[in-house]
Image (cartoon, rainbow, N blue to C red):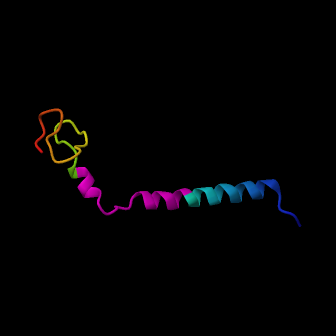
Amino acid sequence: MPASASDMIVKIVFLFLIGMGVLAMFGKLRFPGQTRLMSMKCPKCGRYRIGKGPCPCGKGTG
């Protein structure tokens, strides 16, 4: 007996929700090097500092 269209739609929605849940779990993972990226931001303006010099805003120390 062939499956009805509503059964197929329910299966597709269910698989979509499972996929979104898996992506949400991976999104909460902490990746290595993330703390180093956060420490490269200027504490005053929040911009990323490139190189070892001071921030262009002049307030953050290098």
Highlighted magenta segment, given as a residue range: 20-38
* Quadrant in which the N terminus is drawn: bottom right
Horizontal and vertical percent position of residue 47: 25, 39
In the image, 16: left or right of 44?
right
What is the residue that sits farthest to the top in this orientation? 57
Nearer the observer, 10 or 24 = 24
Horizontal and vertical percent position of residue 32: 31, 63
Residue depicted at x 64% and y 59%: 14
The mark total stands at 0
What is the residue that sits farthest to the right in this orientation? 1
- Does residue 3 lie above or below 59 as drawn? below
Nearer the observer, 54 or 47 = 54
Residue depicted at x 69% and y 57%: 12
Horizontal and vertical percent position of residue 36: 24, 56
Nearer the observer, 36 or 4 = 36
In the image, 41: left or right of 15?
left
Residue 58 on the magenta segment: no
Q: Quadrant of residue 10?
A: bottom right
Horizontal and vertical percent position of residue 4: 83, 57
Q: Quadrant of residue 33?
A: bottom left
Residue depicted at x 22% and y 45%: 41
Secondary structure that dominates the magenta span: helix
In the image, 4: left or right of 45?
right
* Quadrant in which the C terminus is drawn: top left
What is the residue that sits farthest to the bottom in this orientation? 1
Residue 22 on the magenta segment: yes
In the image, 10: left or right of 17?
right
